[in-house]
Image (cartoon, rainbow, N blue to C red):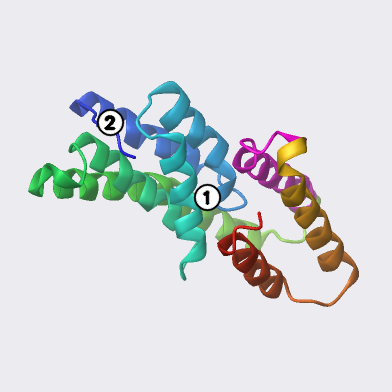
Amino acid sequence: MSLSLQLAWGDWVAFFNHFLSLSLLAVGGAIITAPDMHRFLVDQNGWLTEQQFSSSIALAQASPGPNVLFVAVMGWNVGLNAGTGLGGGWMSVALSGLGVFLSLLGIMLPSSVLTYTTTRWAHHHRDKRGIKAFKLGMAPVVIALLVSTGWLLTASHNNPAKDWPLWLLTLVSVLLVWRTRIHLLWLIGAGAIIGALGWI
C-alpha cells in the first residue's frame, strides 16, 4: 500500500535536515533512531504508512549488508510515494533515487565526520578518566535506545489475548539466548519458519 504525496523542495530539505540531525544521535547504529524516524515520517508528516515503515526495517534487516540499509529503503518509499507509486514512470524512479540519496547522505555524513575526528582525538587521550567514563556511560544509553526501537516495532502487538504466542516465543528466545549456547541465528531462522507457517 503506497501513498500519493506532493512534496515541495522545502519538504525534501526538511527530510534531509531531519536525517542530518538523527545522524548525531545514532551512537548505537542508525536503528536506534527508528522511533524518531517513525514520529517524523509516519505520525507527523504522513510520508510513509505504518506498513511501509515496518516493512522497510524488516526488509533491510533480513538482507545482507549494513543495518543502515533500512534508511535507504525508507527514502526509496518516500520518493515512491511522492512519485505516485510504481506506475509513476521515470519520475517515480527519480524521486525514489532522490529519497535514497538524501536519507543516506543525511544519516551518514555528520556521524561519519564526527566519529572520524573524535576517535582520533580519543585514541590519543584514551587513558584520561573522562574518556573512560564517557565509554562506560554510553552503554546504558545505547541499550535504552535499542529497547525503545524494539518497543516501537512491537507496538502493534498489544492485544495479549490474541498475541500471546508471539510473546511466548519472545520469552522462550530470550531465555534460550541467555541460558544456552544456541546461536541467535538459529532462533531467527526458527522464528522465520514459524512465521511463514502462520503459527504466529
Say left or right for 117 vs 185: left
Q: Residue at x 84, y 77 (%)?
A: 181
When the figure is inspected, residue 76 is found, relative to residue 172, above or below; the finding is above
Find disc 2 in the rendering and name its residue: 13
User: Does the stretch in magenta take in 199?
Assistant: no
In this orientation, does residue 169 appear? yes
Image coords of residue 18 (percent x, y): 41, 33
Image coords of residue 74 (percent x, y): 38, 45
Say left or right for 93 vs 190: left
User: If you read the primary sequence from the N terminus, does the residue marked by circle 1 or circle 2 appear first?
Assistant: 2
Residue 178, numbered label: none
When the figure is inspected, residue 114 is found, relative to residue 152, above or below; the finding is below
Circle 1: residue type:
Ala
* Pick the front one: 32 or 125: 32
* Pick the front one: 64 or 107: 64
Q: Which residues are magenta?
A: 132-160
Say left or right for 149 vs 94: right
When the figure is inspected, residue 181 is found, relative to residue 127, above or below; the finding is below
* Pick the front one: 21 or 119: 21
Circle 2: residue type:
Val
User: Does the stretch in magenta take in 157?
Assistant: yes
* Pick the front one: 138 or 173: 173
Find disc 1 in the rendering and name its residue: 30
* SS at circle 1: helix
Q: Residue at x 19, y 43 (%)?
A: 95
* SS at circle 2: helix
